[in-house]
């Protein structure tokens, strides 16, 4: 699959418009590329797919479970602000510019040609390469750590720059040197765009493809420049995406994507060699094309193996059939020979050369050089023909005929088994293809607004919302705190603010049980977890006690607030939380909750054991420990999935991305407190 420079320009522009003031919150590996998760303080999160052939905003969960070594190294970009995304010149290269909180700058170049490449550079030191996915060395540049990043040699004049005057100039300069070229090949060499667009331009210009470049008239060049302009306009205006899917049995056509339907695609579709699918946008089409490209590759891999196996089975069947036919023929002739020997009463069969030669050709006898070239039986080397009379030999040949018949029956049984395996091969292949496809068809769940923060639902069904960092602390307090809510904070530095939502409850003061639940969440997500404390204190206040500014002469850091008046303490709160899997239908008042009859949609929640025990399919208690990140999350997911009793929910839980679990865990190390099954 090939994406053109002009298509990349469109894609980079749309991504750049959508990521203003976003920062990188996660970086994952996907098939032949990386997946950037970017977040904003108030806007929905975005996922940017950077594959080997293009980049786009994705709505699918395209990440693979295990991050590559290069992807793990690129995670140094997490928490960096994503400043801009742009196309580099007319190249099929995108430039991602990042800036850390300390002001450090980094650029990531994504090259979408020659199977793709990713290069991380330091722009503050003259684009020195810090890391590269595929180290390579060329005549004009070296993609190696420590080298200066340089662009590849320019390939042709950009399609965006072509007009009538420019085309006349190019034609005058180049046709004398390449006078034997066809017009379409000449245009493809001189203009930097993809083959499908070169063909589309000549189709729109109504110029024969076999016409020589030197034979192009001024009128021809005018039509070509007009076709270039109309193509550019159509590409820029397109709000739709299309993919070309080759027929399953066709291995010569590649899957492709485009904002328009080129004429070359229509010809393939009209010939039933491919189908064209329509999508709401080019990004949606690229989402599908990546999945379909991988599915197609796996389908072809499975099909190739199936065809090879089918050929192997057919060859074995043919050999068995030939052997059975030969055995039947020989058995019949041996019986005829045996009858003749027994009726002719030959005393010494060894003297009959015709009999001896035929039995040797039937692999009944062999000549034994170590015994004076005497004839002996193959199945019984110590038994020589000279010891047999005609009657005895006839009886022996009847036995040999029976042996051949028995061998044929065994071969027929083997053939029946081979035929069954060949008949089952199509069904097995179909199931393998569906299995390969199912692994890739996990749709990304659209996150609810509260999932940007720390959250859980209390045992009485109220939402508890907490900050993840200083920025989200400010947002939670300033944007989501109402006058009837309760504000919680741990009595130590590095604590989130947690808000107990009190809409329509009429309860201004929280009960002791609910206060304990919020206090446990507050200390659990505080510095107490990272410092591996056994317990800590928390307190709650009313919203009007939380002041945005400090008293005169004092300073408040970002995300901090001044608490005025009495603090209501909850002492010696155990630093311990539980992780659970719940259905979206269990979320109180959730507008987008799905009906039970539809596909089960699951959320991962982390909160106090008392709070989540009433609405989770399964849960596991955790405490501060020594286990880290991904390995712990993988083990935790396995335990959570195993504990789910509902088969439908258990199957759906297997598709939960590991990142969803990592995201809800507190910062630090972990250990499992209890292996007790849910009641």
Image (cartoon, rainbow, N blue to C red):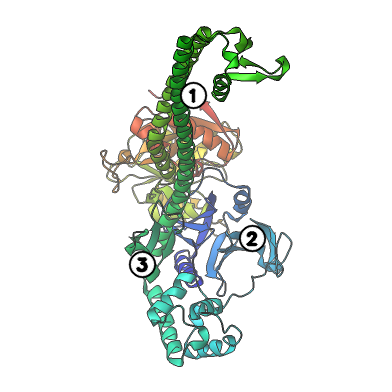
| Front-lying residue, 202 or 259 | 202
- Left or right of 428? Residue 528 is right
| Residue 662 coordinates in the image, percent (x, y) | 51, 42
Q: Label for residue 675?
A: 1
Q: Secondary structure at mark 2?
A: strand
Q: Quadrant of the C terminus?
A: top left
Comes first in the chain, label 2 or label 1: 2
Classify 10 Å Cα crowding around label 3: few (below 14), some (14-19), many (20 and above). Answer: few
| Front-lying residue, 216 or 168 | 216
Residue 384 can be seen in this image: no
- Left or right of 208? Residue 151 is right
| Residue 409 coordinates in the image, percent (x, y) | 42, 20
> Gap between marks 3 and 1, in whole Å?
62 Å
| Residue 217 coordinates in the image, percent (x, y) | 46, 91
> Gap between marks 2 and 1, in whole Å?
44 Å
The residue that label 2 is drawn on is: 120
Comes first in the chain, label 3 or label 1: 3
Residue at image coords 46%, 88%:
221
Q: Label for residue 267?
A: 3
Picture quadrant of residue 181: bottom right
Report how many numbered discs are placed on residues in the image: 3
Classify 10 Å Cα crowding around label 1: few (below 14), some (14-19), many (20 and above). Answer: few
| Residue 99 coordinates in the image, percent (x, y) | 60, 63
| Front-lying residue, 198 or 464 | 198
């Amino acid at each position: 699959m090939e994406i053109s420079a002009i298509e990349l320009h469109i894609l980079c522009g749309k991504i750049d418009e959508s990521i203003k003031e976003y920062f990188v919150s996660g970086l994952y590996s996907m098939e032949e590329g990386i997946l950037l998760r970017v977040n904003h303080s108030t806007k929905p999160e975005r996922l940017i797919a950077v594959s080997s052939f293009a980049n786009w905003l994705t709505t699918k969960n395209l990440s693979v479970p295990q991050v590559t070594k290069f992807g793990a190294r690129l995670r140094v970009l997490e928490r960096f602000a994503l400043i801009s995304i742009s196309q580099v010149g007319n190249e099929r290269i995108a430039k991602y510019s990042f800036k850390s909180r300390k002001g450090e700058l980094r650029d990531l170049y994504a090259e979408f040609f020659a199977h793709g490449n990713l290069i991380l550079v330091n722009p503050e030191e003259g684009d020195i390469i810090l890391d590269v996915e595929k180290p390579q060395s060329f005549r004009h540049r070296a993609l190696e750590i420590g080298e200066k990043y340089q662009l590849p040699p320019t390939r042709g004049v950009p399609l965006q720059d072509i007009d009538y005057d420019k085309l006349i100039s190019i034609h005058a300069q180049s046709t004398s040197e390449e006078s034997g070229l066809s017009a379409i090949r000449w245009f493809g060499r001189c203009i930097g765009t993809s083959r499908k667009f070169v063909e589309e331009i000549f189709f729109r210009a109504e110029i024969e493809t076999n016409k020589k470049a030197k034979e192009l008239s001024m009128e021809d060049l005018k039509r070509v420049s007009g076709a270039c302009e109309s193509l550019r306009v159509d590409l820029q205006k397109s709000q739709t995406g299309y993919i070309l899917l080759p027929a399953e049995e066709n291995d010569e056509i590649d899957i492709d994507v485009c904002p328009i339907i080129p004429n070359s695609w229509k010809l393939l579709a009209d010939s039933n060699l491919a189908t064209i699918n329509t999508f709401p946008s080019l990004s949606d089409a690229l989402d599908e094309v990546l999945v379909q490209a991988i599915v197609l590759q796996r389908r072809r891999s499975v099909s190739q193996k199936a065809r090879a196996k089918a050929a192997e089975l057919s060859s074995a069947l043919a050999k068995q059939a030939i052997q059975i036919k030969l055995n039947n023929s020989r058995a019949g002739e041996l019986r005829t020979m045996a009858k003749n020997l027994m009726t002719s009463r030959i005393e010494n069969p060894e003297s009959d050369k015709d009999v001896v030669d035929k039995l040797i050709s039937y692999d009944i006898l062999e000549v034994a050089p170590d015994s004076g070239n005497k004839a002996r039986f193959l199945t019984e080397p110590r038994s020589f023909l000279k010891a047999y009379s005609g009657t005895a030999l006839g009886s022996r040949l009847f036995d040999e005929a029976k042996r051949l018949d028995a061998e044929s029956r065994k071969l027929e049984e083997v053939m029946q088994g081979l035929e069954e395996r060949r008949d089952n091969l199509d069904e097995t292949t179909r199931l393998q293809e569906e299995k390969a496809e199912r692994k890739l068809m996990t749709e990304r769940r659209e996150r609810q607004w509260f999932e940007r923060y720390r959250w859980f639902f209390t045992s009485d069904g109220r939402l508890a919302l907490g900050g993840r960092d200083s920025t989200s602390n400010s947002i939670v307090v300033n944007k989501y705190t109402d006058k009837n809510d309760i504000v919680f904070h741990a009595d130590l530095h590095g604590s989130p603010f947690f808000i107990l939502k009190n809409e329509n409850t009429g309860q201004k003061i929280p009960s002791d049980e609910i206060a304990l639940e919020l206090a446990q969440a507050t200390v659990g997500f505080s510095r107490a977890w990272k410092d591996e404390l056994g317990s800590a204190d928390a307190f709650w206040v009313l919203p009007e006690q939380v002041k945005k500014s400090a008293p005169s002469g004092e300073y408040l850091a970002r995300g901090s607030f001044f608490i005025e008046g009495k603090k209501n303490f909850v002492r010696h709160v155990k630093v311990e939380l539980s992780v659970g899997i719940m259905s979206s239908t269990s979320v109180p008042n959730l507008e987008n909750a799905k009906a039970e009859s539809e596909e089960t949609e699951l959320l991962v929640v982390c909160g106090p054991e008392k709070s989540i025990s009433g609405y989770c399919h399964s849960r596991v208690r955790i405490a501060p420990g020594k286990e880290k990140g991904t390995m712990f999350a993988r083990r935790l997911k396995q335990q959570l999935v195993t504990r789910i009793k509902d088969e439908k929910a258990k199957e759906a839980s297997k598709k939960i991305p590991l990142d969803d679990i990592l995201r809800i865990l507190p910062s630090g190390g972990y250990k499992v407190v209890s292996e007790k099954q849910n009641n």
